[in-house]
Amino acid sequence: MPQTLPPILFEDNHLLAMVKPAGLPTMGVAAGRTSLVTIAKDYLKRKYGKPGNVYLGVVSRLDSAVSGVIILARTSKAASRLSEQFRCGEVEKIYWALVESRPEAVESVCVDWLRKDEPQRRMVVCGAPQPGAQLARLRYRTLRTMPGNTLLEIHLETGRKHQIRVQLAHRGCPVLGDRKYGATTPFPHGVALHARQLDLQHPVRKVPLRLEAPLPAAWRKFGILG
């Protein structure tokens, strides 16, 4: 993927918020490979003429196939304070998902235990607490219904690996394009899951900060704009 600078939603001396495109890893890639963090560091290095390594603390991340808002900390103090907000559940995390079928309820709370299936390299719902299992909780509401598909708004209350994808698939509503969790409907780029909004407190100025990421162009194919 070319090293194109993703849209910037917010930038100051403490924070950098960007819109991650589907297909771009957040971080953790092999040397010489591109990730959102490598692009962001290169951008800051060039813009401010910084010598040596550029500090960026990753306080939130998204699966490679998922698009949407990500916030990065430009100082260790900001990283520590933001991490504490996420850890204490003080950050409102809102996603949009286009799913196959239609949930039984127009809106609901989903609570499950999730564990990793190592041989399959995926997360699974387990019926009761098991070694290594973590409690996962989210709320959703239906924004729009279409023939065969449903647009959901999801408020993520915990941050487990693949949580939204697993919990919705478990209820017969896999995210479009998500073949790993049973989807049969293709999606143009990645999967139809988008980190729409983050509401948090600025770690230094102590004022409310709302970050909202516009939807990728791929969603327009399904008549969804925003």
Image (spheres, rainbow, N blue to C red):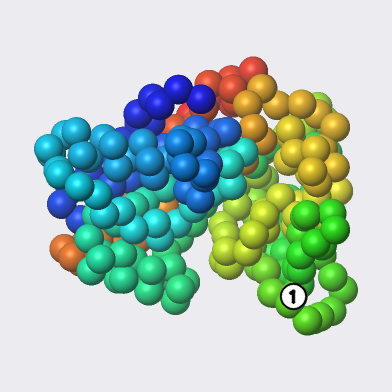
Based on the displayed image, in which of its 4 quarters is residue 142 positioned? top right
Q: Position of residue 26 (x, y in %)?
A: 48, 46
Based on the displayed image, in which of its 4 quarters is residue 203 positioned? bottom left
- Label 1 sits on a secondary structure element that is loop
Based on the displayed image, in which of its 4 quarters is residue 57 positioned? bottom left
Does residue 172 appear left or right of residue 212 in this picture? right
The residue lying toward the viewer, choosing from 112 and 80, is 80
Q: Position of residue 208 (x, y in %)?
A: 27, 59
The residue labelled by disc 1 is 133
* Residue drawn at (52%, 45%) of the image: 29
Asked if one can make out residue 173 in the rendered structure from this viewpoint, the answer is no
Q: Position of residue 118 (x, y in %)?
A: 80, 62
**Direction top: furthest residue:** 221
* Residue drawn at (85%, 58%) of the image: 119
The residue lying toward the viewer, choosing from 164 and 2, is 2
* Residue drawn at (16%, 63%) of the image: 205
Does residue 93 appear left or right of residue 53 in this picture? right
